[in-house]
Image (spheres, rainbow, N blue to C red):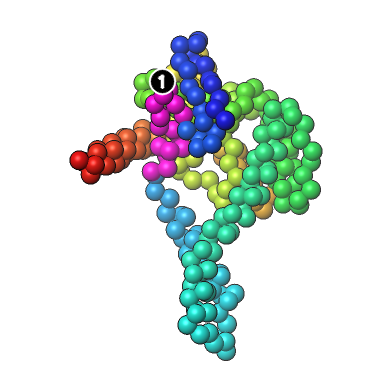
C-alpha cells in the first residue's frame, strides 16, 4: 500500500510504501531517519546476544550428559539463534503494546489487552498520562527535510505538563543513544516545515516487555542532532560507495 503525503503547503509530495517501508519523492528513494540512525553502533546488543546464547547452552548442556556429533551441531546451531527467538518474543509483546497505545492516541478505542505483561505496560502508560496531564495533538506525522533530503515518520506531538513535546514510542529492552538521534532527525525536519512549532521537550516513551515504563527525555538535544547529522554523512557515503561499486562491477 502506498500512501501519499502532501507537505510544505502542497509543494512537496512524499509517497510512503508500507510494503518495504520506503519513502519516494519524484520517484526517487529517500534516506529515512531510521535508516540513517541504523549506522550508529549498538554495542549493548552484542552483549545481550552473547548472554542469550549462554542461557540457551546452560539449559541444554548439563553435567553428566553426553552428546553425539549431530546433536552437538544442532545445539550449537540453536545457541547461535537464541537471541533471535528472544527478540521475536519481545517484538510480539512490544507490537501489541505499541498498537494499543497507537490506537488509543488516535481515538480508535481499542479493547483492553488480556495478556498480563501487555496490560501492565498499558496501565503504566495511563498512569503517566494522568500524572502529567498529557494531551496528544498529532499522531504519525511524515516529515521531510528539504535541506538534508531525508524523510521519516514520528509518533506524536503532545502537551506534557503543558509543554509542546515530541514523542517517539519505543518497545525495547532499553533506551539507547540512537533513539535520541532519531528524535533529533524528526525535530529538525518538522521545524524546517513548521518554524513556529518550537519544542520545549522531546523524549522516548519507553514501554518494555515486562511492564517497565518510563518517559526518557533527550537531555542534550544539540549533541543528539550532531549524532544524527554525523550518521547521515556516513549513511550517504556508504550508499554512494555501494552504488558506485556495483556500477564498476557491471562494466
Tell me if residue 217 is in the magenta stretch: no
Residue denoted by label 1: 26
Residue 120 drawn at (x, y percent): 73, 48
Residue 168 in the figure: left or right of residue 42: right
Q: Residue at x 62, y 55 (%)?
A: 89
* Location of residue 208 in the rendering, given as x and y in whole percent from the top left corner: 63, 48
Residue drawn at (45%, 15%), measured in percent from left and top? 12
Circle 1 SS class? loop
**Mark 1 crowdedness (10 Å alpha carbons): few <14, some 14-19, many ≥20:** few
Image quarter in which the C terminus is found: top left
Residue 179 located left or right of residue 206: left
Please give left or right for residue 237 compared with residue 197 in the image: left
Magenta segment, which residues? 23-39
Frontmost residue, 146 versus 42: 146
Q: Residue furthest front?
A: 251
Rendering coords of residue 71 (x, y %): 52, 79
Amino acid at each position: 500500500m502506498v500512501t501519499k503525503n502532501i507537505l510544505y503547503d502542497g509543494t512537496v509530495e512524499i509517497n510512503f510504501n508500507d510494503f518495504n517501508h520506503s519513502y519516494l519523492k519524484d520517484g526517487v528513494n529517500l534516506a529515512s531517519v531510521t535508516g540513517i540512525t541504523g549506522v550508529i553502533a549498538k554495542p549493548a546488543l552484542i552483549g545481550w546476544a552473547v548472554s542469550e546464547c549462554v542461557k540457551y547452552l546452560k539449559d541444554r548442556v548439563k553435567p553428566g550428559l553426553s552428546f553425539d556429533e549431530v546433536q552437538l551441531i544442532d545445539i550449537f546451531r540453536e545457541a547461535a539463534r537464541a537471541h533471535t527467538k528472544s527478540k521475536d518474543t519481545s517484538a510480539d509483546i512490544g507490537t501489541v503494546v505499541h498498537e494499543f497505545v497507537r490506537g488509543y492516541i488516535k481515538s480508535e478505542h481499542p479493547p483492553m489487552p488480556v495478556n498480563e505483561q501487555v496490560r501492565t505496560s498499558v496501565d503504566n502508560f495511563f498512569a503517566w498520562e494522568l500524572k502529567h496531564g498529557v494531551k496528544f495533538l498529532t499522531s504519525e506525522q511524515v516529515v521531510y527535510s528539504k535541506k538534508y533530503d531525508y524523510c521519516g515518520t514520528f509518533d506524536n506531538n503532545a502537551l506534557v505538563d503543558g509543554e509542546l513535546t515530541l514523542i517517539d514510542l519505543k518497545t525495547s529492552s532499553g533506551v539507547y543513544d540512537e533513539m535520541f538521534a532519531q528524535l533529533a532527525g524528526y525535530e529538525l525536519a518538522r521545524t524546517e516545515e513548521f518554524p513556529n512549532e518550537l519544542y520545549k521537550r522531546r523524549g522516548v516513551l519507553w514501554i518494555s516487555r515486562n511492564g517497565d515504563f518510563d518517559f526518557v527525555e533527550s537531555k542534550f538535544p544539540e549533541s543528539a542532532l550532531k549524532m544524527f547529522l554525523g550518521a547521515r554523512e556516513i549513511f550517504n557515503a556508504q550508499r554512494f560507495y555501494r552504488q558506485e561499486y556495483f556500477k564498476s562491477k557491471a562494466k
